[in-house]
Image (cartoon, rainbow, N blue to C red):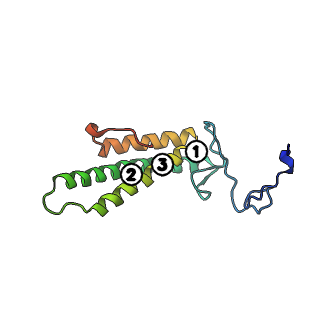
């Protein structure tokens, strides 16, 4: 049975693991937390260490959540135009690009949510709520990745 001490993990950029420290330390939580110190949102460069940075990040995340609802509205309109248009319907390529953008956007928001940080989760939810208020269609309401 090999001990953990004998295992050599070369992890570039990780202090104490044979690499050089290349930037701020990001805390990676797999449990729900309200702590924002050393929180990184999806990317190492989106590093939060102060309450002000958290507030700005929450506003950005809420705007991203609302933007997702705007994108969904535009995709819905393309789909409707595809069904009802007799002249100049969207091409299959336009529909595919819209669908791909929507899938990518939803999974990126899911990754943001998966910081397991309560403040960021609230921001995603508030953004979705605001986006739904402005661009949502009650008849087509459904849960997505955010």
x and y percent of residue 70 in the render? 34, 51
x and y percent of residue 137 in the render? 27, 41
Contact (Cβ within 8 Å) of mark 1 with mark 3 = no
Secondary structure category for the residue under label 1: loop
Contact (Cβ within 8 Å) of mark 2 with mark 1 = no
Mark-to-mark CA distance, 2 and 3 = 11 Å
Dot 2 crowding, Cα within 10 Å, few <14, some 14–19, many 20+: some
Residue picked out by circle 2? 67
Secondary structure category for the residue under label 2: helix
x and y percent of residue 58 in the render? 51, 47
Decide which of tag 2 and tag 1 comes sooner along the chain: 2
Quarter where residue 115 is shown: top right
Q: Nearer the viewer, residue 37 or 40?
A: 40
x and y percent of residue 66 in the render? 39, 48
- 75 sits left or right of 108 in the view: left
Mark-to-mark CA distance, 2 and 1 = 20 Å
Residue located 60% across and 59% down the image: 45
Q: Nearer the viewer, residue 99 or 41?
A: 99
- 26 sits left or right of 67 in the view: right
Quarter where residue 90 is shown: bottom left
Secondary structure category for the residue under label 3: helix
Q: Which is more foreground, mark 2 or mark 3?
A: 3
Residue located 57% across and 53% down the image: 42
Dot 1 crowding, Cα within 10 Å, few <14, some 14–19, many 20+: many
Residue located 64% across and 42% down the image: 29
Decide which of tag 2 and tag 3 comes sooner along the chain: 2
Residue picked out by circle 1? 115
Decide which of tag 1 and tag 3 comes sooner along the chain: 3
- 16 sits left or right of 137 in the view: right
Residue picked out by circle 3? 109
Quadrant where the image shows the C terminus: top left
Q: Nearer the viewer, residue 75 or 136?
A: 75
């Amino acid at each position: 049975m090999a001990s953990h001490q004998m295992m050599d993990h070369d992890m570039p950029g990780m202090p104490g693991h044979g690499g050089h420290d290349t930037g701020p330390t990001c805390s990676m939580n797999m449990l729900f937390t309200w702590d924002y110190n050393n929180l990184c949102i999806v990317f190492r460069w989106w590093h939060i260490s102060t309450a002000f940075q958290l507030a700005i990040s929450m506003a950005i995340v809420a705007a991203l959540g609302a933007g997702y609802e705007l994108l969904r509205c535009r995709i819905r309109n393309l789909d409707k135009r595809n069904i009802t248009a007799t002249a100049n319907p969207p091409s299959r390529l336009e529909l595919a690009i819209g669908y791909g953008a929507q899938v990518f956007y939803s999974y990126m928001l899911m990754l943001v949510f998966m910081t397991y940080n309560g403040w960021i989760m609230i921001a995603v939810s508030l953004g979705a709520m605001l986006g739904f208020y402005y661009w949502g269609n009650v008849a087509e309401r459904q849960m997505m990745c955010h």
